[in-house]
Structure formats: C-alpha cells, structure tokens
Image (tube, rainbow, N blue to C red):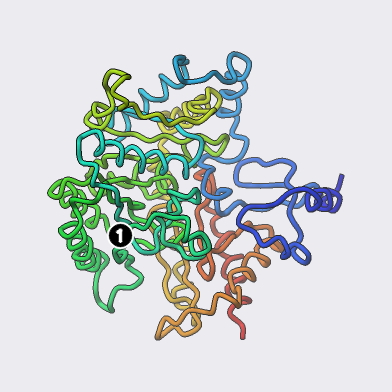
Amino acid sequence: MANREWQSRDLAVVWHPCTQMKDHERLPLIPIRRAEGVWLEDFDGRRYLDAISSWWVNLFGHAHPRIAQAVAEQAARLEHVLLAGFTHEPVIRLSERLVRIAPKGLTRCFYADNGSSAVEVALKMSFHYWRNRGEAGRTRFINLSNSYHGETLGALAVGDVALYKETYEPLLMRPITVPSPDCYLREPGVSWEEHSRRMFSHMEEALARHAGEVCAVIVEPLVQCAGHMRMYHPVYLRLLREACDRHRVHLIADEIAVGFGRTGTLFACEQAGIRPDFLCLSKGLTGGFLPLAAVLTTDEVYGAFYDDYRNLRAFLHSHSYTGNPLGCAAALATLDIFESEPVLERNRRLAARMAAAAAPLADHPHVGEVRQTGMILAVELVRDKARREPYPWQERRGLRVYEHGLARGVLLRPLGNVVYFMPPYVITEEEIDLMVEVAAEGIDIATRD
C-alpha cells in the first residue's frame, strides 16, 4: 500500500502525541515502513535523514543488527516475567553494568517503563526516604525555570515549560522554581562559566530558605532539551552538589535525554565530576529499540527502605513491565557497542564537523545564537538579532523549517523557533553537511517576512 492509504487509515483511528491533529488536514503524516542507519523510508520509497534520533532515543542507527539480534535471541528464550519475587539474567547483568559505568556510589537500580516514570520514581523515592528517616516535613522540590522532566503529573509538576504544564496546573504540586543558568540569557562579554556561577546565587538562596522542607533539587544536567535546547556550564552542577550536601537535600539528575554520550561524556554529570543521589536514565538506554528506564541511587537511600514488612517502609511502586527482559537485552547490546567501539572519540569528531558546518549560521540576520554541547547543536531564530527579540510563537516559523526539511528528505522537528540537531552517532560527515544545508535553506525560507 502507498502512503496515502496508510495516512487515511491512521487518521481514522490514531491520536498522535504532542500534535494538534487538525494540522494533518493540510500536513500529511509520513508513514514509515522501514529504517536503516540514519535513514527512514516511507511507503512511497522516499527517504528522510533522522536528524533528531526519533525524539532523541536512537544512538547507533535504526535497525542496528547487533541490538536487533540481541532482542530476537532474548524473545526466543524469555519475553517477560514479573520482577516482584522473580528475577532474570538480563536485568541482573544490566544492573551490574549500569552500576559499573555510572558515577561511583550509585549502587542500586530501580526500573520503570519510560522517562516520565523514572522521574516519578525518583520524586517518590526521595520523598519517601525523608519520611522513613523521620523528616516528614520535607514535601517540596526545587526545580529550574524552563525545565522539562516529562508529562505524567509528578514529572510535569517539577517541569516549567508552560506549553506542556499550564493547562494542568490545578492538578499539580507546586515546586520552588529558581531561575535557570541558561547561558543564552547571559550579558554581552560574560562567559558561560561566569554566568552559570552568578546564576547559582538564586539556588543557594532557595536552599538556605527552604532546605528543611525540601526533599530534592531536580535538574537536567547541562542541556534543558525540551526547553528549546538551552545550555549551561558544568560549574553550576559542582556548586549545586556542594550546596545540596551542605543543606542535606537530595540531587536528582534527569539524564533521560542527555545521557549515553549526547553531551560528549557518557553521562553529563561526569563533566562536573559529581554524583547525584538519583540518576534517571531512559531514551538512549536501549539504543532506541524499546521503552525502558532506570533510576540509580545509593546504598544510603536503599537502606532507608530496608526493614521488616510490618513497619511499612518498603517502596511499593511498580510497573507491570518493570525490568522487561527484551528491553534489558537491547540495553546490554547498546552498552556492548559503547564498550567495543570508540563511540565517544568518534562523537567528538562528528560534533566538531557539526560545529564547523553550522558556524556560518551565526552570521544569519535572524539567528540569535548557535550553541552546542557535544552531539547537541541548536540554532535560535529571532525576529531582531541585535535585541534577540523572538518571533511570536503563533507564527510557527519552526514549522516552516520542518516542512522544508521533509521536502528535502531530512527530518527536522524544531522546538518552537529553535532548530536543533541531535542525530544518531552513526551519521557520516557528508550526512551532517546535508542536514545542516537543508536546515539553513529552511531557516532562510522561514525567516522571510
């Protein structure tokens, strides 16, 4: 069947995520029948370079044979078993591997189904820890402005992107929100490091004032991805770790989007030399094959729940597919690739190629900034370059870039007026050049008045 028939059948029954479905009256869906490497192929044979790793999940290309084989072999042995009272080899081996590669001191792995669920686990676990330790007055969380941590109610509550959160505000707990160290907002002549240091004063003030009522601070290390790919310096994380220790508050690192090599190191926290109390992982954990999430924490946290059942201190949280063997097999194969290939070294070369290819965009009259952290590069579109005045969101300039990208065979999905690249790590230098060339064309088209 051709694209048109699949499009018609889809629109009769499917409600798509993060989508105003009325848009598809004029913007056709793209039905994908197969994929390989960085390329997606539709039912009419058109190909699209996946410049955003299909919402940041794909690390080593679509249909990677090594991961596919691991999942197939596991499916023939054991597809799933409950993880309450039972266990299995893939979840044990994966837990051992994660503990070995994570920042030292993270020794316990708790599994969930997706990133939002991982954040829910970390929030509940931190709150419950303090309750078990006799400090039931700790019921609040500190977050950063412009942060995003998922769309289930707890995760949504500790985010700060109005587009996702505003409608559901009456349902949500209220965090203590401090200004982000977002370096796009720095004054002229101020370095990323100095701006991030200055902005930490807001966090220090909030911790000093509220520490006794706060369970944890939650941050996305280095890059606020859904918050228009805004970035900051690792020094902020070092200061935050020191302050959380001083004020006896947990630190939750949401590395769901930035983990597994996206920022240039395996985990973004490594660039600050810190260990969070909770490390939330998902997306790239399985190389983009299957939904799986993990929350890593310490023996200190684990010990607060370890007691006789009658004392009701256990962490009674579960998902039906917790620690699914197929997901664990995909994750193990993904980690095998990191171990057997020079992934991070190769990524540094690819990141340098992205930087060089995108550098001319900094001179575009409607580009306010080109910024990059590792394999994440973002281009901020503005109406007025001198004043960095943004385009009104209602004009949907980013959508014009998206449509041009599809016409030229590149999947770009801007965040509002921010065009970004977060490709699979198997992209070639030539494909990077194509990706940036098409984006530059789209930016020219989108910024014509």
Query: In this figure, which residue is indicated by the disc labeled 1?
Result: 176
Q: Secondary structure at mark 1?
A: strand
Quarter occupied by residue 431: bottom right
434 left or right, relative to 169: right
Residue, far left? 246
Tell me where residue 381 appears, x and y as whole percent.
50, 74
Tell me where residue 210 appears, x and y as whole percent.
20, 57
What quarter of the picture does the N terminus occupy?
A: top right
297 left or right, relative to 166: left
Q: Name the residue at 50% across, 61% down.
A: 420
Q: Amino acid at mark 1?
A: Ile
Q: Name the residue at 58% across, 73% down.
A: 443
Asked whether 77 or 135 is in front, the reply is 135
241 left or right, relative to 22: left
Residue 183 vertical placement versus 56 (above, below): below
Asked whether 100 or 303 is in front, the reply is 303
Tell me where residue 16 appears, x and y as whole percent.
67, 52
Q: Name the residue at 47% across, 68% down.
A: 379
Query: What is the crowding at mark 1: few (fewer than 14 residues within 10 Å), some, or many (at least 20)?
Result: some
